[in-house]
Image (cartoon, rainbow, N blue to C red):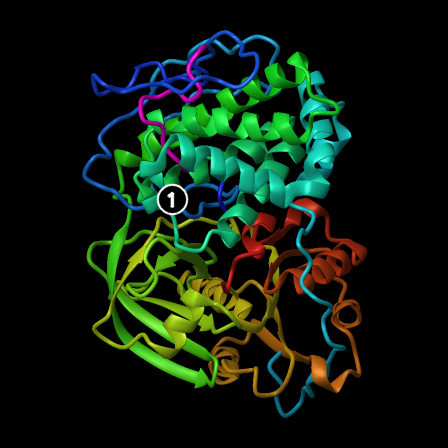
Amino acid sequence: MDAPTTTSADNGTSGGGGGWFTPHQQPVTAPDGEQEAAEGNRLAALRPVGRTTTGHDEHTAAPETGQHHQPAPPAPQQPVSPVPQSLAPHQPAPPAPPSPVPTPQTPPISASAAPPAERRVPPQRAASARAQQASPDAVLIRRTMAEVGPVADKVTSYFYALLFVRHPELRSLFPAAMDTQRDRLLKALLTAAEHIDNTPVLVDYLQNLGRGHRKYGTRPEHYPAVGECLIGALSKYAEHVWGPEFEAAWVRAYTTISQVMIDAAAADELRAPPWWHAEVVAHDLRTPDVAVVTVRPDQPYPFLAGQYTSLETPWWPRIWRHYSFASAPRSDGLLSFHVKAVPAGWVSGALVHRARPGDILRLGPPAGSMTVDHTTDSGLLCLGGGTGIAPIKALVEDVAERGERRPVEVFYGARTDIDLYDIDTMLRLQQSHPWLSVRAVIDQQARLQLPDAIRRYGPWNEYDAYVSGPPGMIRRGVDALRDSGIPSERIRHDSVEELVVIGD
């Protein structure tokens, strides 16, 4: 999902006047570069806190998507600038120093058909943010979002119109079809607005966006143009409430948000490339629309079981989609993904129906926090729906490779028997590991719903829960787990922002 910070400015400012959101080091501008006059009143210049970075010139991938609020991949990081408790302070923050399968004894469980995927699932740790008293800037930002919500498509269309008119050279960096791009911008704004006072959640989210945006060639001087055009679009469609105090709140918030992303990208540049090339070495069509795709990266690719990455195919340049790793890290360095072709899914369709051994894909950095905590011996309760079984399988392998004997309970959800495409693999794992139990939950048979199945086989008080699959399944699964007594902080699932785009 994209944040509203994936595009570039010609000279580090957009709209002229005050030089909003300008990084500490002003980017070099061509002698004949001109700034376009700003619309309406503008505030004095505000600068992101912390440091800026350079060195992305040789990488010119286009912006299209990002990462969600998850911890960094398993490698040491450089520190990023600290963020104030509220990400919208009244004064600019000071600069920081650099820095189961059915077995003969276990009949399958059936569940009613899952409801349509929800656009949003309550994100992890959101309750703590809502419980806090909102800061003044958070109140203004959320009022803005409430005002523009009914006309969200117009807001985002106008934002991109402003951006491409003022900076036409940027249009070629974006996908040919902008519908998904516009949708992602709004989701990013809603996420930032929802968590504006919840520093841990928001910073994790933004740091992953900053790292992920390296594959698009995003630079510090690209952020001012986005900030100017974003506020220009908000001021136009929130005109009934908009005023100087709203503008100032958005400037403060965006200034800090953009610098968190800049700092995360700078730290990541010291330890990882912006992307990896990967050759397809195996393509296993499991059903007419599900394939297991195995690739060999061109250099070591560090990740943890349970994480995911973004993929770009040669058939649809500048269009990236997210897929979970289907195994724990392997000694041969190969990576596998479970891909389901969905209607109008450009990337998923290409990976299932066109990709063949020898094709070259591009991989973004790994992300995701749905990983095993090996410092405890708690049991694992895993819910995997459809291709969401991929990261669940990886988690099981991770526990097995470490020689642990902690109990692992897997509920494998599918709409039909045919959709249990990886049932044989899960059965073999169960036969090899006595601590593993796998149960199938089949929607079509409609004898027992997933929440009832979870309650029937509980209690789960001593378990950590992991949920992966379509958004609707995750929503129901998380609700059932909470009803079963598992606290929210022990339930891990794919981030809400990513759920809407996983699988195309």
- For label 1, count other residues whose C-alpha is less than 10 Å away and answer few (under 14), some (14-19) or many (20+): many
Residue drawn at (49%, 67%), measured in percent from left and top? 396
**Height in image: 202 above or below 420?**
above
Residue drawn at (72%, 42%), measured in percent from left and top? 150
Amino acid at circle 1: Pro
The secondary structure type at the circle numbered 1 is loop
**Height in image: 497 above or below 168?**
below
Q: Is residue 68 magenta?
A: no
Front residue of 157/408: it is 157
| Residue corresponding to mark 1 | 63
Q: Is residue 13 magenta?
A: yes
Residue 318 at x, y percent in the picture = 35, 53
Residue 325 at x, y percent in the picture = 42, 62
Q: In the picture provided, is 223 more to the left or to the right than 179?
A: left
Front residue of 98/148: it is 148
Q: Is residue 57 visible?
A: yes
**Height in image: 275 above or below 322?**
above
Q: Residue furthest bottom?
A: 104
**Height in image: 253 above or below 438?**
above
Front residue of 9/347: it is 9
What range is drawn magenta here?
6-18
Quarter assignment of residue 231: top right
Residue 386 at x, y percent in the picture = 57, 73
Task: Report the predominant secondary structure element of the magenta stretch.
Answer: loop
Residue 435 at x, y percent in the picture = 56, 71
**Numbered marks: total:** 1
